[in-house]
């Protein structure tokens, strides 16, 4: 299941973060980062999913 979350975090970063932590501060931060640039959103999304193992 973790691999699927990481793939989702790469394709659509806010969705991957939402699946991992819900509607918390990391979700809103990821939306902001994704709007500012897709790559920062991906990096943050993968980091959030990977750190909560």
Image (cartoon, rainbow, N blue to C red):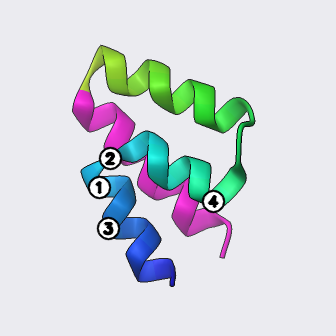
Dot 1: element: helix
Q: Residues within 10 Å of mark 3 (few under 14, many from 20)?
A: few
Q: Is residue 38 above or below residue 20?
A: above
Image side of residue 13 versus residue 26, left or right: left
What is the distance, in whole Å, between disc 1 and disc 4 at their CAs? 13 Å
Whether 53 is drawn above or below 44: the answer is: below
Alpha-carbon span between mark 4 and mark 3: 12 Å
Magenta stretch, residue numbers: 38-53
Q: Position of residue 29 (x, y in %)?
A: 57, 26
Q: Is mark 2 in CB contact (under 8 Å) with mark 4?
A: no
Q: What is the magenta segment's predominant secondary structure?
A: helix
Name the residue carrying label 3: 7
Say which residue appears at 71% left-offset and 37% top-offset: 23
* Image position of 18 (left or right of 44): right
Q: Tell me, for residue 10, which label it has, or none.
A: 1
Q: Earlier in the sequence, mark 4 or mark 3?
A: 3
Who's the residue at 38% across and 55% down the image? 9
Residue that numbered label 4 is attached to: 20
Q: Position of residue 11 (x, y in %)?
A: 25, 53
Is 42 magenta? The answer is yes
- Tell me the CA gap for discs 2 and 4: 13 Å
């Amino acid at each position: 299941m973790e691999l699927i979350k990481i793939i989702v975090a790469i394709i659509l970063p806010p969705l991957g973060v939402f699946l991992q932590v819900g509607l918390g501060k990391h979700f809103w931060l990821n939306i902001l980062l994704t709007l500012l640039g897709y790559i920062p959103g991906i990096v943050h999304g993968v980091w959030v999913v990977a750190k909560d193992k």
